[in-house]
Amino acid sequence: MTYVQNDLGRQALGEAELPNPATHHSSAGGEQQRGRSNLDKLLDAIEGPEQDANKISGRESVRHKFRAKLTIDVYQPGGNKTSHQVVVRNLSSNGLSFIHSGFLHHGTKCCLQLTTLDGAWENISANVVRCRLIKGRVHEIGLHFLAPINLEDFLHQSLAGRILIVEDDPGYAKLITHQLAKSGREVVLADRGFKALKLVKDGHFSVILTDHEMPGMTGTTLVKQLRETGITIPIIMMSANTSDAFRDLALEAGCDKFLPKPVRKEELLAAIDESQCSAEVLKSDFADNPDMIEFID
């Protein structure tokens, strides 16, 4: 028996003032500019290293951080339909996960609506494939879509801005530029570290992607010099050297993320998207829910 009720969902999730994914960049109230919210802290706590959304065995597609409030219709085994407001954790082309105040059986049928970047609604049918207890009555629910969606219709608005690619291989630089072509970003190329330093000094970038093995200045040296000058832009290292020692070296130099070459498009977009999400501000009433206090504190 499914014991989820609408009032319990509202109690656990609060009246979270979450942005519509198609419009939230156009509104910015004063309270939404106060740093990370309780809801962000809760969802980040759930996404600890051991629960990395992209390391679950058997998962076919990369999941992107996607913080939004949706109404999901649940068709219970007995034939009744109930509607619930839920807070979404992440989204992939094949599914999503959300936190909720009750248990749902594996295989339960659901229906939801996602808003595209141009404001249109898309109806999506899905089945429950995971129900993980978080604390008290709070669960993480995983849905699998019956038909895949095009992520570019929903996510890439969050990738607005300028991205600097530091890569001495013109062919690989062209490939990365092509992968980002529909992301809404302006792409700027530099084939040497010293050129990248000048570009960063003279202009604003939201993310930097850099290779390591380059003539004159390695990627880790570039990152160290940028950090030493006070640059806090998210930096992602790309390298064919996938050893743990080199990964640690890149992170110690000041990189935010490491991606092994060749980089898959979905992995690249997910890494860029995640590097930007920490600046997004969401508001919720989770602090009033005793089941959530440990996560928020």
Image (cartoon, rainbow, N blue to C red):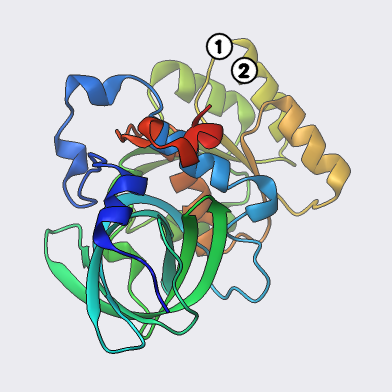
Residue 294 versus residue 111 in the image, above or below: above
Foreground of the two, 294 or 48: 294
The quarter of the rendered structure image containing the N terminus is bottom left
For badge 1, the amino acid type reads Gly
Q: Position of residue 171 (x, y in %)?
A: 57, 58
Mark 1: few, some, or many residues within 10 Å (few <14, many ≥20)?
few
Q: Position of residue 228 (x, y in %)?
A: 64, 12
The residue tagged 1 is 230
Residue sitting at x 45%, y 60%: 179
Q: Position of residue 277 (x, y in %)?
A: 42, 39
Left or right: 197 as drawn, with respect to 150: right
Q: Classify residue 276 by image quadrant.
A: top left
Foreground of the two, 115 or 224: 115
Q: Position of residue 23 (x, y in %)?
A: 16, 46
The residue tagged 2 is 227
Query: Residue most toward the top?
Result: 229
Residue sitting at x 62%, y 17%: 227
Q: Classify residue 280 by image quadrant.
A: top left
- Which label belongs to residue 287? none
Q: Classify residue 15 by image quadrant.
A: top left
Mark 1 and 2 residues: CB-CB less than 8 Å, in contact?
Answer: yes
Cα–Cα span, label 1 and label 2: 5 Å
Q: Secondary structure at mark 2?
A: helix
Left or right: 195 as drawn, with respect to 95: right
Residue sitting at x 67%, y 26%: 254
